[in-house]
Image: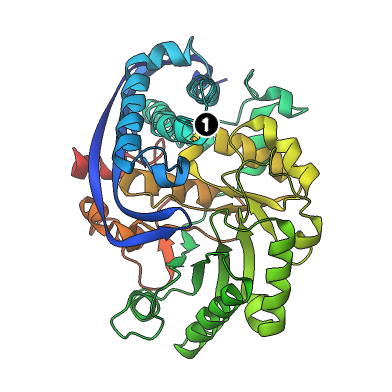
Amino acid sequence: MSTLHHTEVLGARVEFFEQKFRVPLRLSTGLIETITEARATVRVRVGREEAEGSGSIYLSDLWAWPTQALSHAERDAILRKECEGIATALPALTGTAAHPLELGLRLHDAACEKAGTAPPALALALCMAPFDAAIHDAAGRALQESAFAFYRDAVAIPSADAYFPGGACAAISRLLRPPVDALEGWWLVNAHDDLEDPQGDFLRAIRIHGMRNFKIKILAQELSGDAERTVAVYRAARRHGVVAPRLSLDSNEAHADAQAVRDFLRILHQADAEAFGAVMYLEQPTSRDIHRRAFDWHEAAALKPILLDEGLSGLDLLPLMVEQGWSGLALKTCKGHSFTLVAAAWAHERGMLLAMQDLTNPGISAIHSWLVAAHLPVINGIELNSPQFTPQANVAALPALAGLFDIRDGSHRMNPQTAGLGSDLLASHLG
């Protein structure tokens, strides 16, 4: 048995970098124009070996903490302070030596246990996520092996074993696949993007980057209008040379209820059966509070898969996801590497669908997200939006990782054989 179960956090630090969006990203809650990247460094000891690892994430308050009570600047300052508190207290928050997965789950629980309306659990998970990634990255670098090789042995994971009859490590081992070296990418189409402008993003995505898959932001204010927009994107992609476009739909929780989603899908099918057929799934179409805004998804999910995203903020919500009829999970590493693997394994054991989504992950966090998708049986490839919205955050990775950040054939490519979670690929560039 390896020494992984003797992984101990020795210390941590965090730095912040402000990134400006090349073009604004429109959510149902507003526009994202600037954002803070939190970049964490963690030092661990694994048996007798010590190493540092890195992780990063955007502190996307508009996504994780949508509220009118505080400004973006006020929320951003609070989230930075939370990150600084985690860095200072990380050895205490993770506790005694254990498997990196157990350390990450302890951290997730400790960070989120004080959740309330300000900040909510999802925002606190966001602050914790780069440290969880850095723990796994550091452990892998200490042992000079991939963080996805940590599940060969049946090590006890007290924070998760109760969710699996044979233990969490065995379930994650069953989830993981031999990693691929290419994943199909997705281009995000905002609600008002021009589909015909020769210099516009949509045509450039097709002609320069070879994109075939399009995530469409819909506003859920008028169902027939959303159907018309979906059809327009599909037909424009076909007209501009994409033989078989694939679509996903995201209203950022703006639909009123499951019936509205079902009605929208029926309207879309009537408007254009081919466009309807191109839709792979819908992502979190209603409120993230799946307790208070509980809906029966079975009828809508019979038309198209409905994936849970923001609504999953704790492992205790997994049974409720099945009861309500969700089709599967839209995974995001911003909820934590450990949480993501456990939730994905639980869903996979039940034959549910997995898709790899994004939080405009830049640099190290993009590599991390890509590696997760490369090792999991995802249905979509990977959504990786930082090349579209914050390309300057990836400049240090070019040209070495052009296959990941500057694609030309519609797929993100990278060698998945790397230690930890891949921070070594950027270490010489980011310092």
The residue type indicated by label 1 comes to: Ala
- Position above or below: 49 against 385: above
Residue 175 x %, y % = 65, 43
The quarter of the image holding the N terminus is: top right
- Using residue 343 as the reference point, say whether residue 350 is left or right of it: right
Residue 163 x %, y % = 72, 28
Q: Which residue is labeled 1 in the image?
A: 121
Instruction: Please indicate, yes or no, whether residue 93 appears anywhere in the rendered image.
Output: yes
Task: Report the label total.
Answer: 1
356 or 75: nearer the viewer: 75
Residue displayed at 81% across by 60% down:
299
Residue displayed at 75% across by 27% down:
166
- Position above or below: 112 against 56: above
- Position above or below: 270 against 93: below
In this picture the colour scheme is rainbow
Residue displayed at 68% across by 30% down:
316
